[in-house]
Amino acid sequence: MWRTWLLFDPRRALVALFAFLAVLALLIHFILLSTERFNWMHTASLVDTVEQVAVEQTGKSTLG
């Protein structure tokens, strides 16, 4: 294993690894946001809309 680090500079390798993982995480999150099933931002606004409709119909909030 120590011979591997003789081929690659550890600082550059770790920075490259962390940069790759950050880009991969952002890519996965944006892919999930583009789907209807896993878009948590759109789901939260739907819950707010349903809550507003329920308050308007009953006059009482379900949150307390």
Image: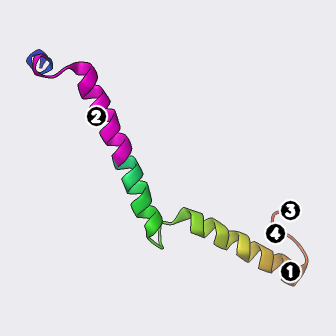
Q: CA distance from mark 4 to mark 1?
A: 11 Å
How many other residues sit within 10 Å of disc 4, few (<14), some (14-19) or many (≥20)?
Answer: few
> Tag 1's secondary structure?
helix
Which tag is nearer the camera, tag 2 or tag 1? 2
- Of the residues shown, which amino acid type is indicated by label 4? Thr
| Residue position marked by numbered label 1 in the rendering | 56
How many other residues sit within 10 Å of disc 1, few (<14), some (14-19) or many (≥20)?
Answer: few
| Residue position marked by numbered label 2 in the rendering | 17
Can you give x and y, in whole percent of width and height, for residue 32 in the image? 43, 62
Labels 4 and 1: the sequence-earlier one? 1
- Of the residues shown, which amino acid type is indicated by label 1? Glu
Can you give x and y, in whole percent of width and height, for residue 54 in the image? 80, 78
| Residue position marked by numbered label 4 in the rendering | 62
Q: For the magenta stretch, what is the residue range?
A: 6-23
- Of the residues shown, which amino acid type is indicated by label 2? Leu
| Camera-side residue of 47 and 45 | 45
